[in-house]
Amino acid sequence: MKLLLIYDGTCAYCRGFARLVRALDLRKRFVLLPFESEQAQKLLRAQFGKDFGFAMFLFEEDSVSWGSEAAKRIVQALSLPGSSVAFWLYPKIVQIVSWLTRRPKRVCGPDCAGLRKASQTQSLPLKSEVCRMLKS
């Protein structure tokens, strides 16, 4: 199964990260989709409802993760060293890039949108409807 990475297509850093993933993805496992695209919005609404926040999302075979958990899983899927570092650095990188680029949207996933407690994991099982959408 392909891994679907939803990233901020309006952010130069995020677009650069997406290009890096594409370049390092020697096994061609990733499909990249800008957050702003209609397809990304449809998938996110199907999984989370209307309040899914704004973050990087990674859809895998049976789960979706966001934020630092998604960063960690991407690094692991690419078989790169440092997945634990990616987990810890992601929030700081987002904060710095948001400040430098004066990003108007607050970066937070479903945990910040009030759907989940921040202390819970940044990953959920895929809903069956989303599984069907990803397979079609």
Image (tube, grey):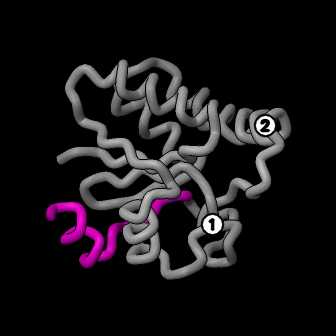
Residue sitting at x 48%, y 75%? 48
**Residue 43 in the image, given as x and y percentages of width and height:** 38, 68
Q: Earlier in the sequence, mark 1 or mark 2?
A: 1
> 88 or 115, which lies in front?
115
Amino acid bearing label 1: Gly
User: Is residue 18 shown left or right of residue 136?
Assistant: right
Amino acid bearing label 2: Thr
> 56 or 32, which lies in front?
32
Tag 1 near tag 2, CB within 8 Å: no
Residue sitting at x 43%, y 40%? 73
1 vs 2, front mark: 2
> 128 or 46, which lies in front?
46
Q: How many marks?
A: 2
**Residue 49 in the image, given as x and y percentages of width and height:** 49, 81
Q: Is residue 128 magenta?
A: yes
Badge number at residue 53: 1
Badge number at residue 19: none
Magenta segment, which residues? 122-136
Pick the quarter of the image with the C terminus. Answer: bottom left
Residue occupied by mark 2: 101
Assign a secondary structure to mark 1.
loop
Residue sitting at x 29%, y 71%? 130
**Residue 88 in the image, given as x and y percentages of width and height:** 67, 35
Assign a secondary structure to mark 2.
helix
| Residue 63 lies in quadrant | bottom left
**Residue 32 in the image, given as x and y percentages of width and height:** 37, 42
> 123 or 44, which lies in front?
44
